[in-house]
C-alpha cells in the first residue's frame, strides 16, 4: 500500500505543475455551459408560466446542470487514457512489468491524485459560477439521498477510471486509439446525461440507457441528489451501478491480461 | 560550381502552385492510414448527430426557442457544423501545430523559405475527411429547408456563402491570434483547445441570449453568436436588419487585421527555441 501512496504523492506534485492549465480548462468549460443554461431559460420563457419540461421546473433544470458540473469536476478523467495509451505505444510499461508494482494500481493512484488537484483548482471558477446561480442550488432531497449521492459519486469515479483505462488498453491491439476514445466519449456525452437529463427522453429510451453504465457517471448521482430517483428506483440504480463497477473491474483485468500477452515492447 | 538561383515566378502563379503541392502531400499522407481516415469521419459525424439529437429532444418539449422553430434550429446547427468543418479542413491542424513549430525550432527553417511564412503555416496540411463532414452538413441544411418549404433565391445563397467565408475568417483569425501566444507561453495548445470549445456557442439561436455582458462579448469581441446565426438567417430569409451582416463582415476584417499585427509583433520578438 505504501508504494501506491508514494505514487499518489508524486502524482500530486506532478499535476500541480498544470494547475494554471486546469484552472483555464475549468473556467472555459463554463462558457458553453452558460450558453446551454440561457437556451433552457429561453425554452421555459416560451412556455406558460409554471410549466415544466418532463417534470423539471426551470430551477431544477439549472440545479441539474450545476450538479453535473460539480460531479464531473470531481470524477472525470483528464489525461489518464491518453497517457496509458502512450505508455503502451512507446513501450514505457515494460519497466512496470519487471517491478513489484501493479501498473493498473499505479494508474489508479495517479488518477486519484489528478482528481484531487483538479477538484481543488476547479473549485475556484465553479464555486464562483454556482454563487451567481445560488438561488438554484438546492440541498439534497433527504439525508438518505445525500448519503446515496456520495456513495454513487464515488462509484461514478471508479466507473470513469475503469472505462477510460479499458479503452486505453486497446493500444495493445491498435496503433492509434484516439478515434476509439473519441467515439466512446461521444456516447458518454449523451448517455451519461452531460448534454441533458436522461429522463427528458422518451420513456423507453431512458429505461434502455439506464441498463448501460453511462447514466451512472452523472445522471444517476445527480438524480438521486435532486430526489428525482428514490425508493425502489434508487436501490435498483445502486445495484446496477455496483454491478457495473464489479463487472468493469473484471473486464479491465481480463483485457489487461490478454493485452500483456500480446505486448511486444515496441521501442522499449 | 554554384548555379544562380532561378528567378522566382510572380506571386499569383507561385502561391496557387504551392497550394496545389501542399494538397498533394496531404492526400498522400492521409491515404497511408485509410482506416484511421474513415474513423475520424465517423467521430465527427457522431458529434454532429449528437447536436441534432439534442435539439430534437428539446423540441419534443417546446414549439419554439426565441422565435426559431425546429427546422430553423436544425438549419442553424447544420450551418454551424458546416463552417466548423470547412475550418477544420483548412486550418485546424495547421494552427494547432504552430506551438510545435516554435518548440521544436522548425519555424526557423520555415522563416528562411522564400515564401510568406504565415501562408505556409496556415495551409501546410489539408484535412480531407472534414470535407466529407462539411458535405453532410450541407445535406442537413437542404433537408431542413425542404421541411420548411423554403427555397432560397440564388442571391440569398450567394450571400450565405459570402457570410460563411466571413465567419471562417473570424474563426481562423482568432485562433491564429491565440496560437501566436505560443511565442510567449510554450504550451499554447490548451488555448487552441479552449477556443474550439467556444464553437459550441455558435449553434445557439442568438435571440436566446439575453442582453448583457455575455451577449456583448460573444457578439463584438469573440463574435461566436454572429458566425453561424447570420448566414443561417440569410438563408432562411429571417434577417431583420442589414446591420448584422455588415457587422459580421466588418468584424472579420478587423479580426484578420489584428491577428496579422500580433503575428508580426510576435515574429519580431522571436529568438528561436533550439540551437
Image (tube, grey):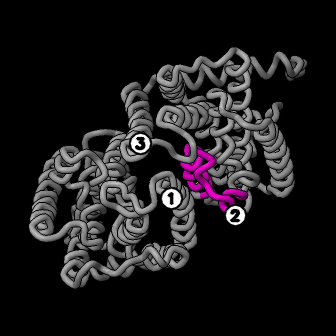
Residue A265: percent from the left, percent from the top?
28, 49
Residue A81 visible to the viewer:
yes
Q: Secondary structure at mark 2?
A: helix
**Per the image, is B5 magenta?**
no
Counting residues from the start of the chain, the first of labels 2 and 3 encountered is 3
How crowded pointer 3 is (Cα within 10 Å; few <14, some 14-19, many 20+) is rated as some
From the image, tell me which residue sits under label 3: B59
In front here: A265 or B71? Answer: B71
Residue at position x 22%, y 71% from top?
Answer: A152
Q: Are marks 2 and 3 in contact (CB under 8 Å)?
A: no
Question: Which picture quadrant has residue A138?
Answer: bottom left
Give the number of the mark in front: 2 or 1.
Answer: 1
From the image, tell me which residue sits under label 2: B213
Residue B35: percent from the left, percent from the top?
36, 28
Question: In the displayed structure, would residue A127 be above or below residue B14?
Answer: below
> Which chain contains the residue that carries disc 3?
B
Question: In the displayed structure, would residue A225 be above or below residue B46?
Answer: below
> Which chain contains the residue that carries disc 2?
B
Magenta range is: B191-217
Is circle 2 on the same chain as circle 1?
no
Q: Which mark is residue A41?
A: 1
Amino acid at each position: 500500500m505504501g508504494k501506491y501512496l508514494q505514487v499518489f504523492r508524486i502524482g500530486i506534485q506532478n499535476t500541480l505543475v498544470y494547475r494554471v492549465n486546469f484552472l483555464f480548462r475549468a473556467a472555459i468549460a463554463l462558457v458553453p455551459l452558460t450558453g446551454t443554461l440561457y437556451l433552457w431559460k429561453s425554452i421555459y420563457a416560451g412556455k406558460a408560466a409554471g410549466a415544466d419540461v418532463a417534470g423539471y421546473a426551470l430551477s431544477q433544470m439549472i440545479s441539474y446542470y450545476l450538479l453535473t458540473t460539480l460531479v464531473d469536476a470531481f470524477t472525470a478523467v483528464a489525461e489518464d487514457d491518453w497517457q496509458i495509451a502512450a505508455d503502451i505505444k512507446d513501450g514505457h510499461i515494460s519497466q512496470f512489468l519487471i517491478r513489484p508494482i501493479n501498473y493498473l494500481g499505479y494508474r489508479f493512484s495517479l488518477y486519484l491524485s489528478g482528481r484531487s488537484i483538479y477538484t481543488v483548482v476547479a473549485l475556484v471558477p465553479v464555486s464562483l459560477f454556482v454563487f451567481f446561480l445560488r438561488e438554484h442550488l438546492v440541498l439534497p432531497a433527504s439525508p438518505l439521498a445525500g448519503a446515496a449521492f456520495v456513495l454513487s459519486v464515488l462509484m461514478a469515479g471508479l466507473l470513469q477510471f475503469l472505462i477510460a483505462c479499458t479503452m486505453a488498453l486497446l493500444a495493445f491491439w491498435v496503433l492509434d486509439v484516439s478515434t476509439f476514445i473519441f467515439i466512446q466519449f461521444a456516447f458518454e456525452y449523451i448517455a451519461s446525461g452531460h448534454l441533458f437529463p436522461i429522463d427528458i427522453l422518451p420513456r423507453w429510451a431512458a429505461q434502455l440507457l439506464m441498463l448501460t453504465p453511462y447514466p451512472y457517471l452523472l445522471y444517476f448521482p445527480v438524480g438521486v441528489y435532486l430526489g428525482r430517483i428514490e425508493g425502489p428506483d434508487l436501490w435498483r440504480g445502486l445495484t446496477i451501478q455496483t454491478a457495473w463497477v464489479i463487472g468493469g473491474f473484471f473486464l479491465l483485468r481480463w483485457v489487461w491480461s490478454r493485452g500483456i500477452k500480446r505486448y511486444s515492447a515496441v521501442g522499449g | 560550381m554554384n548555379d544562380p538561383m532561378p528567378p522566382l515566378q510572380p506571386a499569383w502563379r507561385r502561391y496557387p502552385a504551392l497550394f496545389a503541392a501542399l494538397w498533394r502531400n496531404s492526400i498522400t499522407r492521409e491515404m497511408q492510414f485509410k482506416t484511421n481516415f474513415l474513423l475520424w469521419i465517423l467521430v465527427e459525424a457522431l458529434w454532429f448527430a449528437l447536436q441534432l439529437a439534442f435539439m430534437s429532444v428539446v423540441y419534443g418539449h417546446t414549439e419554439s426557442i426565441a422565435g426559431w422553430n425546429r427546422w430553423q434550429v436544425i438549419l442553424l446547427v447544420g450551418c454551424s457544423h458546416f463552417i466548423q468543418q470547412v475550418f477544420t479542413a483548412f486550418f485546424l491542424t495547421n494552427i494547432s501545430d504552430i506551438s510545435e513549430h516554435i518548440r521544436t525550432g522548425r519555424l526557423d527553417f520555415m522563416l528562411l523559405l522564400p515564401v510568406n511564412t504565415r501562408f505556409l503555416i496556415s495551409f501546410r496540411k489539408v484535412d480531407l475527411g472534414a470535407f466529407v463532414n462539411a458535405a453532410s452538413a450541407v445535406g442537413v441544411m437542404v433537408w431542413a429547408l425542404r421541411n420548411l418549404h423554403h427555397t432560397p433565391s440564388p442571391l440569398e445563397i450567394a450571400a450565405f456563402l459570402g457570410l460563411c467565408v466571413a465567419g471562417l475568417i473570424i474563426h481562423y483569425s482568432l485562433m491564429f491570434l491565440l496560437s501566436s501566444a505560443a511565442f510567449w507561453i510554450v504550451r499554447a495548445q490548451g488555448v487552441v483547445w479552449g477556443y474550439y470549445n467556444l464553437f459550441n456557442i455558435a449553434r445557439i439561436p442568438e435571440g436566446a441570449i439575453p442582453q448583457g455582458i455575455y451577449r456583448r462579448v460573444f457578439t463584438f469581441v469573440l463574435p461566436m453568436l454572429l458566425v453561424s446565426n447570420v448566414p443561417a438567417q440569410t438563408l432562411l430569409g429571417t434577417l431583420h436588419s442589414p446591420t448584422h451582416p455588415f457587422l459580421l463582415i466588418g468584424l472579420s476584417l478587423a479580426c484578420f487585421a489584428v491577428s496579422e499585427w500580433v503575428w508580426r509583433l510576435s515574429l519580431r520578438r522571436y529568438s528561436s527555441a533550439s540551437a
